[in-house]
Image (cartoon, helix red, strand yellow):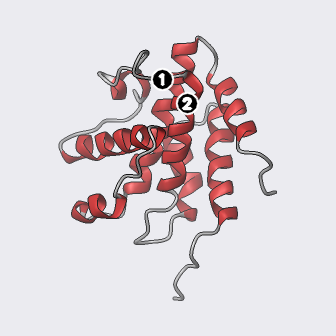
Amino acid sequence: MPARKVPTPQDAAIARRILLDGMARDTGVSGLAGELAALHPRGNTFPGEVFLQVAADALEWCGASRAEPLALEGMPERFLPECAFRGRQNKKLQFAVLAAAALRGGVEPDLLGEVAWWQTDDFWQYALYAAVAYIRAAASGAGVPVRRVCQELAQRAGPQPG
């Protein structure tokens, strides 16, 4: 079987669109993961990087800052109630959540250095969880529907491929 091509900027735009459109339609996390799985090349962090960028955009959208921080305590229970995380899964989610916050702050996390010890090919899924949680948290904090946050984040990205 031939190796999958290297992800392109168009692939990144498609991943972003699937995530934001799906969340705007109230698609659950497992449904989103099912739609996005085909975009993930085995042994690659893509589309995880895209999801971290979306999560960072959600933090920017809601105005999270040092003066007005977004509380992470209880985030999985509040914003990912359909998911159950145990043991190392909690650490993986924590890394993805903190990596998105680092991006928002202008710091590029060492994804490969971190996920190498995971010994699994699931970083993209934890980045997806982080994006979903941050989008839901942004909507909750602003008192608006998730659909609105997704629409505004999609507009910020500019035109998307077909």
In the displayed structure image, the side of residue 137 where residue 122 appears, left or right: left
Helix, strand or loop at mark 2 = helix
Residue 151 image position (x, y, % from top left)? 72, 32
Q: Residue at x 71, y 44 (%)?
A: 157
Identity of the residue furthest to the left in this view:
87
In the displayed structure image, the side of residue 61 where residue 83 appears, left or right: left
Q: Are marks 1 and 2 in contact (CB under 8 Å)?
A: yes
Circle 1 crowding by C-alpha within 10 Å: few under 14, some 14–19, many from 20 = some
**27 to 116, vertically: above or below:** above
**128 to 70, vertically: above or below:** below
Residue 162 image position (x, y, % from top left)? 82, 57
In the displayed structure image, the side of residue 47 where residue 93 appears, left or right: left
Q: Residue at x 61, y 44 (%)?
A: 19
Give how far apart the Cα atoms at labels 1 and 2 are.
6 Å
Mark 2: amino acid: Glu
Q: Residue at x 31, y 35 (%)?
A: 84
Quadrant in which residue 135 is drawn: top right
Residue 54 image position (x, y, % from top left)? 56, 42
In the displayed structure image, the side of residue 123 where residue 150 appears, left or right: right
Tell me how many marks there are: 2
Q: Tag on residue 114?
A: none
Query: Is residue 25 visible in this depiction of the protein?
Result: no
Q: Residue at x 21, y 63 (%)?
A: 117
The residue where tag 1 is placed is 64
The residue where tag 2 is placed is 60
Quadrant in which residue 14 is drawn: bottom right
